[in-house]
Image (cartoon, grey):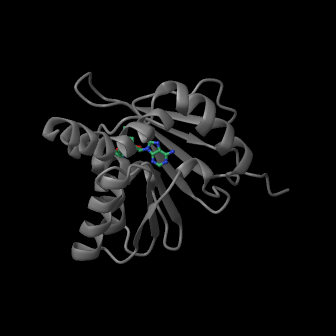
Amino acid sequence: MFSTSLALICFILLLPIALAALSLAPWVPTKKQDLERISQYSDLKPGQIFLEMGCGDGRVCTYIARKNPEAQVIGIELALWLYVYARIKQMITGPKNLKIIFGNALKHDFSVIDVLYVFGLPETVNKKVKTKVIKEMKPGAKLISYIFTIKDWPGTIQEHQSSKDEARILVYQKKSVSKH
Ligand SMILES: C[S@@+](CC[C@H](N)C(=O)[O-])C[C@H]1O[C@@H](n2cnc3c(N)ncnc32)[C@H](O)[C@@H]1O
């Protein structure tokens, strides 16, 4: 009886994390040593909006929000316990320009986002994320992908990895509309 109840509790606790893992990727955090690089490649300007799809424990969006107090930063997380952790941390330590949302990041409106950060599985990033970004994001907006490449990107691409010990960070930018 006790072991059945324990198994049921474990199942209930782990189910949200398992469902999120199937959607974008399981929770594997970005390395803390790469946070500054992500901030630099984002090159956020005051008033711009940064969105982290699947923010996990909130380390990336928190770092970006602290480094860019004039920008709006959003982290969306589908796994309930990770969301609760990131949200409580944000309520206690801030920063105020960071909003943590519970939900499916693939359903969020990307049209107002200036910089989108994702650490997802190659297949999900190449299918679900790429399609939505091409359809919704505005010209000049950036998609930053941690480690995994996006095939056949119809805009500019920068690949950052100066040594094999460093994680690859890819910056995909949508073509800007020409002004003449
Ligand atoms: C590889 S982890 C990256 C975590 C965090 N972005 C980081 O870099 O430290 C992927 C995260 O996305 C979350 N996730 C998966 N599918 C999602 C979805 N559709 N919407 C929001 N979050 C999702 C997972 O729960 C997990 O926390």
Residue at 28% x, 54% y: name it: 59
35 over 50 or under it: above or below: above
Residue 5: which quarter of the image?
Answer: top left
Q: Among all residues in the image, which is located at the extreme left?
A: 2
- Give the left or right position of residue 177, taking residue 137 as reference: right
Residue drawn at x 29%, y 51% as measured from the top left: 36
Residue 119 visible to an observer of this rendering: no
Residue at 53% x, 25% y: name it. 123
From this view, report whether residue 116 is shown above or below residue 17. Answer: below
Q: Quadrant of ligand 1?
A: top left
**Residue 128: x, y in percent?**
61, 36
Between residue 95 and residue 40, name the one nearer to us: 95
Residue at x 39% of width, y 30% of height? 147
Q: In the image, residue 94 lies at what x, y percent?
A: 28, 74
The reply, left or right, for residue 12 in relation to residue 106 is left
Image x and y of residue 25, in percent: 42, 35
Q: Looking at this rendering, what residue extends furthest in the front direction?
A: 1
Is 142 in front, or is 131? 131
Q: Which of the image's four quarters has the C terminus? A: bottom right
Q: Assign the N terminus to one quadrant of the image.
A: top left
Vertical comparison of 131 with 112: above or below: above
